[in-house]
Amino acid sequence: MVKLLITSLTALVLSLAAVNAQTGPINAASYPPANQVPDINSPQVQAWLKEVNLTGVPPTHLNVPDVKGGAPDCAKITPQNDCYSVCDECKANDDIITCGLPNSWGVTFDDGPSPDTPRLLDYLKTHNIKASFFVVGGNVVQYPDILRREVQEGHHLASHTWSHYALTSLTNEQIVAEIKWTEKAVFDVTGLKLKYMRPPYGDINNRVRFILKQLGYIVVDWTGDEFDTNDWQADNGVPAATLLAAFTKSLDTYIAGNKSTGFYCLEHDRSPVTVNLAQQFIPLGIARNLTFANVPGCQHDAQPYQSGSAHNNNTTTTLAPTSTVSGTSRPTGSTSTRTPVPTGSSANLVESMNIASAFVATVVGFLFM
Ligand SMILES: *[C@@H]1O[C@H](CO)[C@@H](O)[C@H](O)[C@H]1NC(C)=O
Ligand SMILES: *[C@@H]1O[C@H](CO)[C@@H](O)[C@H](O)[C@H]1NC(C)=O
Ligand SMILES: *[C@@H]1O[C@H](CO)[C@@H](O)[C@H](O)[C@H]1NC(C)=O
Ligand SMILES: *[C@@H]1O[C@H](CO)[C@@H](O)[C@H](O)[C@H]1NC(C)=O
Ligand SMILES: *[C@@H]1O[C@H](CO)[C@@H](O)[C@H](O)[C@H]1NC(C)=O
């Protein structure tokens, strides 16, 4: 009797493990290498190119990046009358640059997932703040479990391309490859087809806009330089105090205005330093009684994916300034310790282990009754 039970329990545990295998780690080797523009001659990209209608793409010349993959150097750019964001400071009507909620901070993090993202997720959870994560495809296939956790905890996913190259420096076909590989990676991990994107460096012109629109994407930038936290500069040695002072000034200017629309703030979950800084920037907004919202919350979008749905119901949060400003934030400044990189589908595995052990406990309890 006991032996029979143990045998069937083993079978149960094995079958739970099998279920998890289907949602487990994806094979990064079946995607393009990270940090490189994907090969447009692969059968996969060629198939995507057959599906997208590039007739009528504005014939803009390619911008030459300043450094490999980086933003173009405006001194070397010939104006092309193509509403170029970086050098002409041109925004198209379709570019979303403000959060459509009054008195609000649109919370966005670019460049992840990274080994530091889980620490940020812990922090956001303590404040019930939901963010939009503009993810890099090459990182998605490296950290699929972190991406799944973002969705499970009510955050929103959007695209930040495959390799983070400046899009105006890429060919039409390379842009398609950058967007579609990222879309596929996120879909393979979560079942969600992305709808919003942010161009790396905010680098976009009418040619890039045309292609993104053909692929079904809506562009979300940040609300001007004053709402770029420049957190990444702390990775290059700029003191946190300098960045915090500049951003405090921006917030106070915003607070003094009519606040009829919110702002999108640019932050990154790409390094220990930027994740620590997020935990210093956000309390500045809490102290000023701002509402925090992600892109679905700011845009009042109940379907923030081209297909698939996630539990993104609570997309806005207002925190009482007095009770949350101090005490609850995690200690910052420990830049040398990284959260270990999770391997395999640990969250799901833990969940099914709990179910299995609860079942074992119940059966064992029954046997000894
Ligand atoms: C592609 O787009 C062009 C311009 O919008 C249009 O005229 C043409 O019919 C489209 N082709 C297909 C196959 O949909
Ligand atoms: C609020 O201020 C912004 C910019 O300062 C202005 O464009 C807008 O018209 C103002 N809205 C109202 C309702 O006063
Ligand atoms: C904070 O903002 C909310 C909504 O915007 C408002 O109802 C509330 O009165 C504000 N509280 C304080 C202390 O300013
Ligand atoms: C979220 O909202 C949708 C539609 O409003 C609803 O169908 C769904 O049950 C809600 N999810 C949760 C977890 O409440
Ligand atoms: C949404 O937030 C409200 C207030 O914080 C809470 O009462 C409600 O249960 C939440 N709903 C979901 C689906 O998480």
Image (spheres, rainbow, N blue to C red):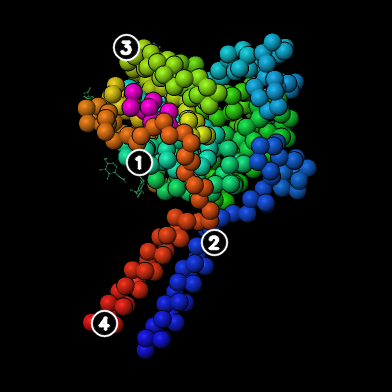
Q: Which residues are magenta?
A: 276-284
**Does label 2 or label 3 sit earlier along the sequence?**
2
Residue 205, located in which quarter of the rendered image? top right
Q: Residue furthest right?
A: 41
Task: Please name the amino acid that badge 3 sits on.
Answer: Ala
In the picture shown, does residue 66 fall above or below 174? above
The residue that mark 1 highlights is 125
**Does label 4 or label 2 sit earlier along the sequence?**
2
Residue 48 appears in the rendering: no
Asked whether the beta carbons under mark 4 and mark 2 sit within 8 Å of each other, the answer is no
In the picture shown, does residue 284 fall above or below 161? above
Residue 256's tag is 3
Q: Judging from the image, what secondary structure is the residue with disc 2 in?
A: helix
By secondary structure, the bulk of the magenta-drawn segment is best described as helix
**Does label 2 or label 1 sit earlier along the sequence?**
2
The residue that mark 4 highlights is 368
Residue 177, located in which quarter of the rendered image? top right
Q: Does the segment drawn in magenta span residue 56?
A: no
Q: Whole-Å distance between the Cαs marked 2 and 1? A: 27 Å
Closer to the eye: label 1 or 3:
1
Residue situated in front as seen by the camera: 231 or 109: 231
Q: Position of residue 237 (x, y in %)?
A: 52, 22
Asked whether the beta carbons under mark 1 and mark 3 sit within 8 Å of each other, the answer is no
Q: Residue at x 32, y 11 (%)?
A: 256
Q: Whole-Å distance between the Cαs marked 4 and 2? A: 36 Å
Q: Whole-Å distance between the Cαs marked 3 and 4? A: 69 Å
Please rate how many residues cluster around mark 2, counting C-alpha atoms within 10 Å: few if below 14, some from 14 to 19, many from 20: few
**Does label 3 or label 4 sit earlier along the sequence?**
3
Rendered-image quarter of ligand 3 = top left
Task: Please name the amino acid that badge 4 sits on.
Answer: Phe
In the rendered image, which quarter contains the N terminus?
bottom left
